[in-house]
Amino acid sequence: MTALLELIGDYTIQNVALGAALLGIVSGALGCFAVLREQSLLGDTLSHAALPGVCLGFLVAGGRELGSILAGALLTGVLAALAMLALVRMTRLKTDAALGIALSLSFAAGVVLLTYIQGTGNASQGGLDAFLFGQAAAILRRDLWVMGGITAFALTMVALLWKELKLVTFDPEFAGVIGLPVRLLDALLTVMVALAIVVGLQMVGVVLMAAMVIAPAVAARQWARSLGIMVIVAALMGVAAGVFGAVVSALGRGLATGPLVVLSASAITLVSLLIAPGRGLLWGLHRRLAFRRRLSQEAVLLTLYRLASAHEDPHYPTEQGAVDAYHGVGTRRSLQALARRGLVRSCQHMREEGAHWVLTRRGRSRAKYLQAGGDLARDGG
C-alpha cells in the first residue's frame, strides 16, 4: 500500500499518466472519424509529416521549446494533409497513393533536417531525436497545459460541429446536396487529427503515434453501435491504454513509456477483435459452427422425411444405422439434437435391430417447409 501511494505521489509518474490520459482522450475520439472514413493511413502520414515541423520549430526557437516544436509539427502535418487532399482531387491518384507520397516526402525531409541539426553542434539539441520514439519521462507540468489546451480545443470543435461531422463521415454526397461545405469540413477533420498527432508527439513519438489514432477507434468499433458511443468508448480505451502503459513503465526499469502505451492499446484492440459480442472473431466462428451443425440436422431430417414418403407412411420408423450409412457419418448427435427440438422421437421397432427414429408432427411440417425450398436460417422448430 505504501509503495502504491509513493507511486501515485511521484511527480514524474503523475505527469506521464496525465499526459497519457490526455493523449488517449483526443486520439481515441478523433481516431473514430479517421477509421470510419477509411483513412486509417492518414494518422501514419500526419505523424511522420510532423517530424520536419519538429525540426523547424527547434530551428526557429533556437532550442527545445515545446510550444514552438508542437506548432511546427502541426503546421507541417496540416500542409502534408492538404497536399494529400489536393493530389487526390487534382490528379487521378487514389487516396492510398497520395498518402504514401505525402508520408515518404515528409519523413525524408524530417530526417534531413534532423541530421542537419545534429551536425550544427547546438548543445540544446539533446533529446530532439526522442520525438521519433517519444520521451514521456521528459514531460513537464507546463507541457501538460499545452497538451490539455489542444485537447480541449479539438473536443470543443467536435462537440460544436457534431451533426455536420457525423453527416460528412457517413454520407458526404448527401451533405453536399443539402449545402454543407464538405471540403471545408473534410479539411477541418484532417486538421483535428493532426492536432491529436501533435498531442502525442512527446509521449509516443512520430513513428508510433499512428497506432494511438487507429487502435482505440478500431477497438471501440467492435463494441459500439453508434458514433456517439464509439467516440466515448474509444476515448476511455485510449485513457486506459495510456495510464496502464505509463504505470507499467514506472514499475519496470528501462521500459520506454511510449511503446508500452502503444502495446497496451494494441492488446485492447486484439481482445476486442476476438471477443466483442456480435462482431468478434470468436463469435463469428461460433456462428459458423452452429450453422454447420444446424445444416447437418436439417439434412438428417429431410432424409427421414423422404424415407417415410417413399414408404407412404408418415410414422415410418427409420433405423439409425440406415441414416448413418446414407450420410456416410454418424448421425446420433444430429438425431438427438432434432429430438431436443421436438422434430423427431426415438421408438422401438424390432428387438434385434438398433435404435429407430420417427418424425413428429412438427418434424413433418419442418421437413415439408425445407423440401419446398424454405430458408435454413428460419427456425421452424
Image (cartoon, rainbow, N blue to C red):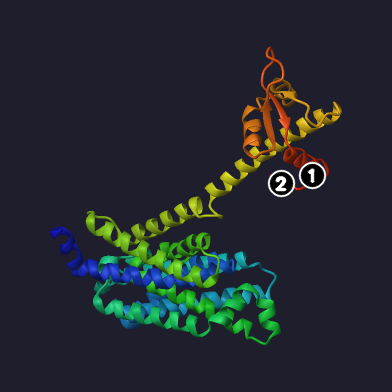
Mark 1, residue position:
369
Q: In the figure, is residue 234 to the left or right of 287?
A: left
Q: Image point 40% across, 67% down: which residue?
A: 236
Q: Nearer the viewer, residue 286 or 12?
A: 286
Give the crowd class for mark 2: few <14, some 14-19, many >=20 residues within 10 Å.
Answer: some
Q: How far across and how far down the image is residue 12, in percent? A: 21, 68
Q: Quadrant of residue 381?
A: top right
Q: How far across and how far down the image is residue 243, in percent? A: 31, 64
**Disc 2 marks which amino acid?**
Gly
Q: Closer to the N terminus: mark 1 or mark 2?
A: 1
**Disc 1 marks which amino acid?**
Tyr
Q: Where 179 sits versus 294, above or below?
A: below
Disc on res. 248: none
Q: Quadrant of the N terminus?
A: bottom left
Mark 2, residue position:
380
Q: Where 17 sits versus 167, above or below?
A: above
Asked whether disc 1 touches disc 2, contact meaning CB atoms under 8 Å apart, the reply is: yes
Q: Where 159 sits versus 209, above or below?
A: below
Indicate the secondary structure of the residue bearing disc 1: helix
Q: Nearer the viewer, residue 331 or 215?
A: 331
Give the crowd class for mark 1: few <14, some 14-19, many >=20 residues within 10 Å.
Answer: some
